[in-house]
Amino acid sequence: MLNSSMSKIILLVEEIENGRRKCANQIAHEKLGLDVNEACEEDDNFLVFNNKEYFEFHTTNTYDITSDTDVIYYIETKSTQDHLNPLWTYGISPRTIKKLQKYNIPIMINETQEFFMDYVSEGNHTRSSSLADFLDRKLISLGLINNNIIINGVANLGDSKPFIPLSNRKIFTNYSFYFFTRAKHFINQDITNKRLSTIQEHLNTDKDKIGLCINRQPRELRCVLLALLESYRKESIFTMLGEEPLHNKLSIGEVYEKFRSNVLLLKDEDLKEQGLKNIESLIKDFPEEFDIERNKDVQKMHMIPNKEINKVRLRCMFELVTETHDSKYKELDASVITEKSLWPILNKIPFAIIGHQGNYRFLKKLGFNLYEKDLLSENDTNNTYEHNFRSCIELFHKFKYTDTSNWVEDHKDACELNFSIILNTNWGKVEADNLKLLLRRQSV
Protein backbone atom coordinates (compact mmCIF):
# COMPACT_ATOMS: atom_id res chain seq x y z
CA MET A 1 0.00 0.00 0.00
CA LEU A 2 1.57 3.29 -1.10
CA ASN A 3 1.41 6.35 1.08
CA SER A 4 -0.06 9.32 -0.76
CA SER A 5 2.12 11.82 1.13
CA MET A 6 5.68 11.30 -0.05
CA SER A 7 6.94 14.22 2.04
CA LYS A 8 6.37 12.44 5.33
CA ILE A 9 9.05 10.45 7.12
CA ILE A 10 8.09 6.80 7.33
CA LEU A 11 8.91 5.04 10.61
CA LEU A 12 8.97 1.26 10.24
CA VAL A 13 8.01 -1.02 13.12
CA GLU A 14 7.34 -4.75 13.21
CA GLU A 15 3.62 -4.78 13.96
CA ILE A 16 0.68 -2.38 14.00
CA GLU A 17 -2.64 -3.68 15.28
CA ASN A 18 -5.69 -1.64 16.28
CA GLY A 19 -3.58 1.50 16.23
CA ARG A 20 -0.97 0.05 18.61
CA ARG A 21 2.53 -0.40 17.28
CA LYS A 22 5.20 -2.86 18.32
CA CYS A 23 8.84 -2.35 17.51
CA ALA A 24 11.46 -5.10 17.55
CA ASN A 25 12.41 -4.26 21.14
CA GLN A 26 8.92 -4.98 22.46
CA ILE A 27 8.68 -8.21 20.47
CA ALA A 28 12.08 -9.41 21.69
CA HIS A 29 11.11 -8.76 25.31
CA GLU A 30 7.83 -10.61 24.84
CA LYS A 31 9.60 -13.62 23.31
CA LEU A 32 11.87 -13.83 26.36
CA GLY A 33 9.06 -13.23 28.84
CA LEU A 34 10.61 -9.96 30.00
CA ASP A 35 8.78 -6.78 30.96
CA VAL A 36 9.25 -3.78 28.72
CA ASN A 37 8.22 -0.34 29.91
CA GLU A 38 5.42 0.97 27.72
CA ALA A 39 5.30 4.65 26.84
CA CYS A 40 2.85 6.32 29.20
CA GLU A 41 0.02 8.43 27.83
CA GLU A 42 1.83 11.68 28.71
CA ASP A 43 4.96 10.54 26.86
CA ASP A 44 2.84 9.73 23.84
CA ASN A 45 1.21 13.17 23.86
CA PHE A 46 4.56 14.92 23.43
CA LEU A 47 6.24 12.45 21.08
CA VAL A 48 6.64 14.41 17.86
CA PHE A 49 6.64 11.18 15.85
CA ASN A 50 2.90 10.95 16.57
CA ASN A 51 2.40 14.15 14.56
CA LYS A 52 0.77 12.67 11.46
CA GLU A 53 1.45 15.79 9.43
CA TYR A 54 5.15 14.88 9.29
CA PHE A 55 5.48 11.22 10.31
CA GLU A 56 3.72 7.93 9.68
CA PHE A 57 4.25 4.53 11.29
CA HIS A 58 4.13 1.51 8.99
CA THR A 59 5.34 -2.06 8.77
CA THR A 60 7.15 -3.50 5.78
CA ASN A 61 3.81 -5.11 4.88
CA THR A 62 1.92 -1.81 4.70
CA TYR A 63 4.38 0.42 2.91
CA ASP A 64 6.09 -0.08 -0.45
CA ILE A 65 9.53 1.41 0.03
CA THR A 66 11.32 3.01 -2.88
CA SER A 67 14.84 4.32 -3.17
CA ASP A 68 13.68 7.93 -2.64
CA THR A 69 11.55 7.24 0.45
CA ASP A 70 12.48 9.02 3.68
CA VAL A 71 12.33 5.93 5.85
CA ILE A 72 13.76 4.92 9.23
CA TYR A 73 13.59 1.64 11.14
CA TYR A 74 12.27 2.62 14.56
CA ILE A 75 13.35 1.09 17.89
CA GLU A 76 11.77 2.39 21.12
CA THR A 77 13.88 1.87 24.26
CA LYS A 78 12.39 2.68 27.63
CA SER A 79 15.27 1.45 29.78
CA THR A 80 17.97 4.09 29.79
CA GLN A 81 20.62 1.46 30.49
CA ASP A 82 19.75 -0.75 27.52
CA HIS A 83 19.64 1.46 24.46
CA LEU A 84 22.79 -0.16 23.03
CA ASN A 85 21.82 -3.65 24.20
CA PRO A 86 21.40 -5.77 21.03
CA LEU A 87 18.53 -7.69 22.65
CA TRP A 88 16.09 -5.90 20.33
CA THR A 89 17.71 -7.48 17.28
CA TYR A 90 15.97 -10.75 18.22
CA GLY A 91 12.66 -9.07 17.44
CA ILE A 92 13.50 -8.23 13.81
CA SER A 93 11.61 -10.40 11.34
CA PRO A 94 13.39 -11.96 8.31
CA ARG A 95 11.09 -9.90 6.07
CA THR A 96 12.29 -6.68 7.72
CA ILE A 97 15.94 -7.69 7.52
CA LYS A 98 15.62 -8.09 3.75
CA LYS A 99 14.12 -4.60 3.42
CA LEU A 100 16.76 -3.06 5.66
CA GLN A 101 19.45 -4.69 3.54
CA LYS A 102 17.92 -3.81 0.18
CA TYR A 103 17.36 -0.11 0.88
CA ASN A 104 20.12 0.34 3.48
CA ILE A 105 17.56 1.84 5.88
CA PRO A 106 19.02 3.63 8.94
CA ILE A 107 18.07 2.36 12.39
CA MET A 108 16.81 4.84 14.98
CA ILE A 109 17.19 4.05 18.69
CA ASN A 110 14.73 6.36 20.42
CA GLU A 111 14.32 7.53 24.01
CA THR A 112 12.96 11.03 23.86
CA GLN A 113 13.60 12.16 27.45
CA GLU A 114 17.12 10.87 27.99
CA PHE A 115 20.65 11.54 26.84
CA PHE A 116 23.08 8.90 25.67
CA MET A 117 26.78 9.32 24.99
CA ASP A 118 28.11 5.87 25.74
CA TYR A 119 28.35 5.08 22.03
CA VAL A 120 31.47 7.30 22.16
CA SER A 121 34.70 5.93 23.58
CA GLU A 122 35.63 7.60 26.88
CA GLY A 123 39.32 7.45 26.06
CA ASN A 124 39.05 8.65 22.45
CA HIS A 125 36.12 10.85 21.45
CA THR A 126 36.76 10.27 17.75
CA ARG A 127 35.80 6.59 17.86
CA SER A 128 33.00 4.32 19.04
CA SER A 129 32.78 2.62 22.43
CA SER A 130 33.00 -1.11 23.13
CA LEU A 131 29.22 -1.16 23.72
CA ALA A 132 28.61 0.28 20.25
CA ASP A 133 31.13 -2.16 18.76
CA PHE A 134 29.22 -5.08 20.31
CA LEU A 135 25.93 -3.89 18.77
CA ASP A 136 27.72 -3.43 15.43
CA ARG A 137 28.95 -7.03 15.44
CA LYS A 138 25.43 -8.31 16.15
CA LEU A 139 24.00 -6.29 13.27
CA ILE A 140 26.75 -7.57 10.95
CA SER A 141 25.87 -11.16 11.91
CA LEU A 142 22.33 -10.46 10.66
CA GLY A 143 23.66 -9.15 7.37
CA LEU A 144 23.02 -5.52 8.31
CA ILE A 145 26.47 -4.27 7.44
CA ASN A 146 26.08 -0.67 6.29
CA ASN A 147 22.89 0.54 8.00
CA ASN A 148 23.64 3.73 9.90
CA ILE A 149 22.40 4.23 13.46
CA ILE A 150 20.56 7.33 14.67
CA ILE A 151 20.52 7.95 18.43
CA ASN A 152 17.39 9.99 19.16
CA GLY A 153 17.38 11.71 22.55
CA VAL A 154 18.28 15.03 24.15
CA ALA A 155 22.00 14.84 23.36
CA ASN A 156 23.32 16.06 20.04
CA LEU A 157 26.77 15.79 18.50
CA GLY A 158 28.20 19.16 17.47
CA ASP A 159 29.01 20.47 14.02
CA SER A 160 32.73 19.72 14.35
CA LYS A 161 32.01 15.99 14.81
CA PRO A 162 28.53 15.26 13.39
CA PHE A 163 28.91 11.47 13.53
CA ILE A 164 31.00 8.70 15.06
CA PRO A 165 32.38 6.05 12.65
CA LEU A 166 31.43 2.47 13.51
CA SER A 167 32.91 -0.21 11.25
CA ASN A 168 31.13 0.22 7.88
CA ARG A 169 28.40 2.45 9.31
CA LYS A 170 28.10 5.75 11.16
CA ILE A 171 26.38 6.79 14.38
CA PHE A 172 24.41 10.03 14.04
CA THR A 173 22.41 11.88 16.67
CA ASN A 174 19.04 13.54 16.28
CA TYR A 175 17.76 15.90 18.96
CA SER A 176 14.30 15.06 20.32
CA PHE A 177 12.14 18.15 20.85
CA TYR A 178 9.97 16.29 23.38
CA PHE A 179 10.65 18.82 26.16
CA PHE A 180 10.01 21.78 23.84
CA THR A 181 6.66 20.30 22.79
CA ARG A 182 5.79 19.74 26.43
CA ALA A 183 6.85 23.30 27.36
CA LYS A 184 4.53 24.66 24.66
CA HIS A 185 1.75 22.56 26.20
CA PHE A 186 2.42 24.10 29.62
CA ILE A 187 2.07 27.61 28.15
CA ASN A 188 -1.28 26.73 26.60
CA GLN A 189 -2.40 25.14 29.88
CA ASP A 190 -1.39 28.21 31.86
CA ILE A 191 -4.27 30.28 30.52
CA THR A 192 -6.35 28.69 33.26
CA ASN A 193 -3.79 27.26 35.73
CA LYS A 194 -1.63 30.40 36.18
CA ARG A 195 1.41 28.47 37.35
CA LEU A 196 4.01 30.33 35.29
CA SER A 197 5.55 33.68 36.21
CA THR A 198 4.89 36.85 34.20
CA ILE A 199 7.02 39.91 33.43
CA GLN A 200 4.64 42.00 35.51
CA GLU A 201 5.20 39.76 38.53
CA HIS A 202 8.95 40.15 38.06
CA LEU A 203 8.55 43.94 37.87
CA ASN A 204 6.47 43.95 41.06
CA THR A 205 8.90 41.83 43.11
CA ASP A 206 12.07 43.17 44.73
CA LYS A 207 15.20 41.40 43.54
CA ASP A 208 16.89 40.64 46.85
CA LYS A 209 18.90 37.65 45.58
CA ILE A 210 21.59 37.41 42.93
CA GLY A 211 20.91 34.03 41.35
CA LEU A 212 18.91 30.84 41.60
CA CYS A 213 20.46 27.40 40.99
CA ILE A 214 18.18 24.37 41.32
CA ASN A 215 19.71 20.90 41.89
CA ARG A 216 18.46 17.52 43.07
CA GLN A 217 21.06 14.80 42.57
CA PRO A 218 24.68 15.44 43.66
CA ARG A 219 26.42 14.89 40.33
CA GLU A 220 29.92 16.07 39.52
CA LEU A 221 29.26 19.41 37.82
CA ARG A 222 26.60 20.42 40.37
CA CYS A 223 28.70 19.54 43.41
CA VAL A 224 31.77 21.36 42.12
CA LEU A 225 29.78 24.44 41.12
CA LEU A 226 27.96 24.79 44.45
CA ALA A 227 31.19 24.26 46.37
CA LEU A 228 32.95 26.98 44.38
CA LEU A 229 29.99 29.40 44.71
CA GLU A 230 29.56 28.82 48.45
CA SER A 231 30.63 32.37 49.34
CA TYR A 232 27.66 33.70 47.31
CA ARG A 233 25.07 31.30 48.76
CA LYS A 234 23.63 33.65 51.37
CA GLU A 235 23.03 36.26 48.67
CA SER A 236 21.50 33.70 46.31
CA ILE A 237 19.28 30.63 46.45
CA PHE A 238 20.90 27.28 45.75
CA THR A 239 19.19 23.93 46.21
CA MET A 240 20.65 20.45 46.52
CA LEU A 241 18.23 17.76 47.60
CA GLY A 242 20.95 15.12 47.82
CA GLU A 243 18.97 12.33 46.18
CA GLU A 244 20.61 9.25 44.63
CA PRO A 245 18.73 7.73 42.92
CA LEU A 246 15.84 10.16 42.45
CA HIS A 247 13.63 10.54 45.57
CA ASN A 248 16.07 8.59 47.74
CA LYS A 249 17.66 10.95 50.30
CA LEU A 250 21.33 10.44 51.05
CA SER A 251 22.74 10.97 54.52
CA ILE A 252 24.73 14.12 55.26
CA GLY A 253 27.89 12.02 55.33
CA GLU A 254 27.13 10.58 51.91
CA VAL A 255 26.42 14.03 50.48
CA TYR A 256 29.66 15.35 51.99
CA GLU A 257 31.62 12.56 50.33
CA LYS A 258 29.90 13.23 46.98
CA PHE A 259 30.98 16.88 47.14
CA ARG A 260 34.50 16.06 48.26
CA SER A 261 35.18 13.32 45.69
CA ASN A 262 33.88 15.49 42.84
CA VAL A 263 35.88 18.57 43.85
CA LEU A 264 39.01 16.39 44.00
CA LEU A 265 38.60 15.72 40.26
CA LEU A 266 39.46 19.35 39.47
CA LYS A 267 42.84 19.79 37.76
CA ASP A 268 43.20 23.43 38.81
CA GLU A 269 44.85 23.28 42.23
CA ASP A 270 43.64 26.73 43.33
CA LEU A 271 40.02 25.88 42.50
CA LYS A 272 40.37 22.48 44.14
CA GLU A 273 41.74 24.00 47.36
CA GLN A 274 38.96 26.62 47.48
CA GLY A 275 36.26 24.04 46.75
CA LEU A 276 37.43 21.67 49.49
CA LYS A 277 37.54 24.54 51.98
CA ASN A 278 34.04 25.68 51.04
CA ILE A 279 32.49 22.25 51.51
CA GLU A 280 33.03 22.54 55.26
CA SER A 281 30.87 25.69 55.36
CA LEU A 282 28.29 24.32 52.94
CA ILE A 283 27.68 21.04 54.74
CA LYS A 284 26.95 22.81 58.06
CA ASP A 285 23.72 24.15 56.58
CA PHE A 286 22.75 20.97 54.75
CA PRO A 287 19.98 20.00 54.22
CA GLU A 288 17.88 22.77 55.82
CA GLU A 289 19.11 25.68 53.69
CA PHE A 290 19.22 23.68 50.46
CA ASP A 291 15.53 22.78 50.27
CA ILE A 292 13.13 25.66 49.52
CA GLU A 293 9.94 23.63 49.04
CA ARG A 294 7.45 22.95 51.80
CA ASN A 295 5.12 20.80 49.72
CA LYS A 296 7.02 17.53 49.35
CA ASP A 297 4.37 15.97 47.12
CA VAL A 298 4.84 18.79 44.61
CA GLN A 299 8.61 18.47 44.96
CA LYS A 300 8.41 14.89 43.72
CA MET A 301 6.52 16.06 40.63
CA HIS A 302 9.57 17.89 39.34
CA MET A 303 8.53 17.66 35.69
CA ILE A 304 5.61 20.07 36.00
CA PRO A 305 5.39 23.83 36.81
CA ASN A 306 6.10 24.54 40.48
CA LYS A 307 4.62 27.62 42.17
CA GLU A 308 6.97 27.45 45.16
CA ILE A 309 10.06 27.59 42.97
CA ASN A 310 8.50 30.30 40.83
CA LYS A 311 7.97 32.52 43.89
CA VAL A 312 11.71 32.25 44.51
CA ARG A 313 12.49 32.95 40.85
CA LEU A 314 10.75 36.31 41.21
CA ARG A 315 13.32 37.36 43.83
CA CYS A 316 16.37 36.55 41.69
CA MET A 317 18.19 38.43 38.95
CA PHE A 318 18.85 35.32 36.91
CA GLU A 319 18.81 31.55 37.00
CA LEU A 320 21.98 29.49 36.61
CA VAL A 321 21.00 26.18 35.01
CA THR A 322 23.19 23.17 35.76
CA GLU A 323 22.17 21.26 32.68
CA THR A 324 22.37 17.46 32.52
CA HIS A 325 26.05 16.68 32.04
CA ASP A 326 28.20 13.58 31.65
CA SER A 327 31.63 14.62 32.87
CA LYS A 328 33.34 11.72 31.08
CA TYR A 329 32.55 13.56 27.84
CA LYS A 330 33.17 17.14 28.97
CA GLU A 331 35.68 17.68 26.14
CA LEU A 332 33.31 16.33 23.46
CA ASP A 333 31.59 18.85 21.18
CA ALA A 334 28.01 17.99 22.11
CA SER A 335 24.89 19.61 23.51
CA VAL A 336 22.40 18.30 26.08
CA ILE A 337 19.28 20.41 26.58
CA THR A 338 16.52 19.13 28.88
CA GLU A 339 13.54 20.68 30.66
CA LYS A 340 16.01 22.36 33.06
CA SER A 341 16.91 24.98 30.44
CA LEU A 342 13.26 25.59 29.57
CA TRP A 343 11.95 26.46 33.06
CA PRO A 344 13.56 29.95 33.15
CA ILE A 345 12.25 30.60 29.63
CA LEU A 346 8.72 29.60 30.63
CA ASN A 347 8.96 31.81 33.71
CA LYS A 348 10.52 34.80 31.94
CA ILE A 349 13.73 35.15 33.89
CA PRO A 350 17.20 35.70 32.35
CA PHE A 351 19.36 32.60 32.59
CA ALA A 352 22.80 31.14 31.98
CA ILE A 353 23.65 27.49 31.39
CA ILE A 354 26.64 25.45 32.47
CA GLY A 355 26.91 22.00 30.92
CA HIS A 356 28.15 20.56 27.65
CA GLN A 357 30.15 22.65 25.20
CA GLY A 358 27.56 22.92 22.46
CA ASN A 359 24.56 24.03 24.54
CA TYR A 360 24.74 27.73 23.69
CA ARG A 361 25.37 27.13 20.00
CA PHE A 362 22.41 24.75 19.83
CA LEU A 363 19.94 27.15 21.48
CA LYS A 364 21.18 30.16 19.54
CA LYS A 365 20.56 28.31 16.27
CA LEU A 366 16.93 28.00 17.35
CA GLY A 367 16.81 31.79 17.83
CA PHE A 368 16.98 32.05 21.62
CA ASN A 369 18.59 35.05 23.33
CA LEU A 370 21.08 33.84 25.94
CA TYR A 371 21.84 37.18 27.65
CA GLU A 372 25.52 36.94 26.73
CA LYS A 373 26.20 40.62 27.31
CA ASP A 374 25.30 40.46 31.02
CA LEU A 375 25.58 36.79 31.99
CA LEU A 376 27.73 34.04 30.46
CA SER A 377 28.86 34.03 26.84
CA GLU A 378 29.19 31.08 24.51
CA ASN A 379 32.97 31.28 24.96
CA ASP A 380 32.55 31.13 28.74
CA THR A 381 30.56 27.92 28.47
CA ASN A 382 32.32 25.99 25.70
CA ASN A 383 35.83 26.42 27.06
CA THR A 384 37.67 24.12 29.46
CA TYR A 385 35.92 22.64 32.48
CA GLU A 386 37.85 24.86 34.91
CA HIS A 387 37.31 27.96 32.75
CA ASN A 388 33.55 27.34 32.98
CA PHE A 389 33.68 27.42 36.78
CA ARG A 390 35.84 30.53 36.88
CA SER A 391 33.35 32.28 34.59
CA CYS A 392 30.51 31.42 36.99
CA ILE A 393 32.46 32.73 39.98
CA GLU A 394 33.18 35.98 38.12
CA LEU A 395 29.51 36.29 37.18
CA PHE A 396 28.30 36.14 40.79
CA HIS A 397 31.12 38.43 41.91
CA LYS A 398 30.12 41.01 39.28
CA PHE A 399 26.55 41.13 40.55
CA LYS A 400 27.69 42.13 44.03
CA TYR A 401 28.72 45.47 42.54
CA THR A 402 26.25 45.96 39.68
CA ASP A 403 23.34 48.41 39.65
CA THR A 404 20.38 46.17 38.86
CA SER A 405 17.54 48.62 39.50
CA ASN A 406 16.39 48.38 35.85
CA TRP A 407 17.26 44.72 35.41
CA VAL A 408 13.79 43.39 34.57
CA GLU A 409 12.92 46.32 32.31
CA ASP A 410 16.22 45.98 30.45
CA HIS A 411 15.73 42.26 29.80
CA LYS A 412 11.99 41.88 29.38
CA ASP A 413 12.14 41.95 25.57
CA ALA A 414 14.61 39.06 25.53
CA CYS A 415 12.47 37.12 28.01
CA GLU A 416 9.36 37.66 25.88
CA LEU A 417 11.24 36.67 22.73
CA ASN A 418 12.38 33.37 24.22
CA PHE A 419 8.88 32.65 25.53
CA SER A 420 7.36 33.35 22.10
CA ILE A 421 9.80 30.99 20.39
CA ILE A 422 8.60 28.14 22.60
CA LEU A 423 4.96 29.05 22.00
CA ASN A 424 5.00 29.82 18.28
CA THR A 425 7.37 27.21 16.89
CA ASN A 426 6.04 24.06 15.24
CA TRP A 427 8.42 21.64 16.97
CA GLY A 428 7.13 18.67 14.96
CA LYS A 429 8.16 20.42 11.76
CA VAL A 430 11.54 21.39 13.23
CA GLU A 431 12.28 17.78 14.15
CA ALA A 432 11.04 16.48 10.79
CA ASP A 433 13.18 19.02 8.91
CA ASN A 434 16.24 18.13 11.00
CA LEU A 435 15.71 14.43 10.34
CA LYS A 436 15.32 14.99 6.60
CA LEU A 437 18.62 16.90 6.56
CA LEU A 438 20.25 14.09 8.51
CA LEU A 439 18.92 11.48 6.07
CA ARG A 440 20.36 13.46 3.17
CA ARG A 441 23.69 13.89 4.93
CA GLN A 442 24.05 10.25 5.98
CA SER A 443 23.60 9.08 2.41
CA VAL A 444 26.56 11.17 1.20
Image (cartoon, helix red, strand yellow):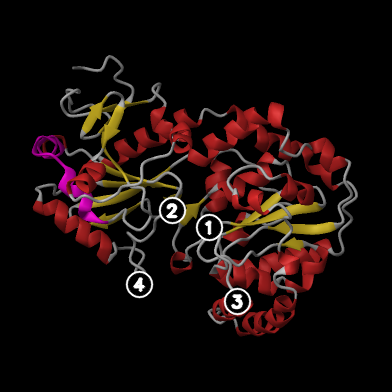
Sequence order check, earlier mark of 2 and 1: 2
Mark 4 or 3: the one toward you: 3
Sequence order check, earlier mark of 4 and 3: 4
* Label pair 2/3, CB-CB below 8 angstroms: no
Rendering coords of residue 246 (x, y %): 53, 60
Horizontal placement of 412 versus 4: left or right?
right
Sequence order check, earlier mark of 3 and 1: 3
Q: Which mark is residue 115?
A: 2
Q: Specify whether residue 303 is in view.
A: yes
Secondary element type, mark 3:
helix
What amino acid type should be assigned to the residue bearing mark 3? Phe
Is 327 above or below relative to 168?
below
Mark 4 or 1: the one toward you: 1
* View extreme (top): residue: 4
| Distance between the alpha carbons at the discs numbered 3 and 1 | 17 Å
Horizontal placement of 380 versus 281: left or right?
left
Check disc 3 and report the residue beneath it.
Answer: 259
Whether residue 136 is in magenta: the answer is no
In which quadrant of the rendered image does the N terminus lie?
top left
Is 244 above or below relative to 418?
below
Q: Which mark is residue 123?
A: 4
Sequence order check, earlier mark of 2 and 3: 2
Whether residue 88 is in magenta: the answer is yes
Rendering coords of residue 168 (x, y %): 17, 53
Which range is magenta? 85-100
Horizontal placement of 217 versus 136: left or right?
right
Check disc 1 and report the residue beneath it.
Answer: 324
Sequence order check, earlier mark of 2 and 4: 2
What amino acid type should be assigned to the residue bearing mark 2? Phe
Our reading of the magenta stretch's main secondary structure is helix
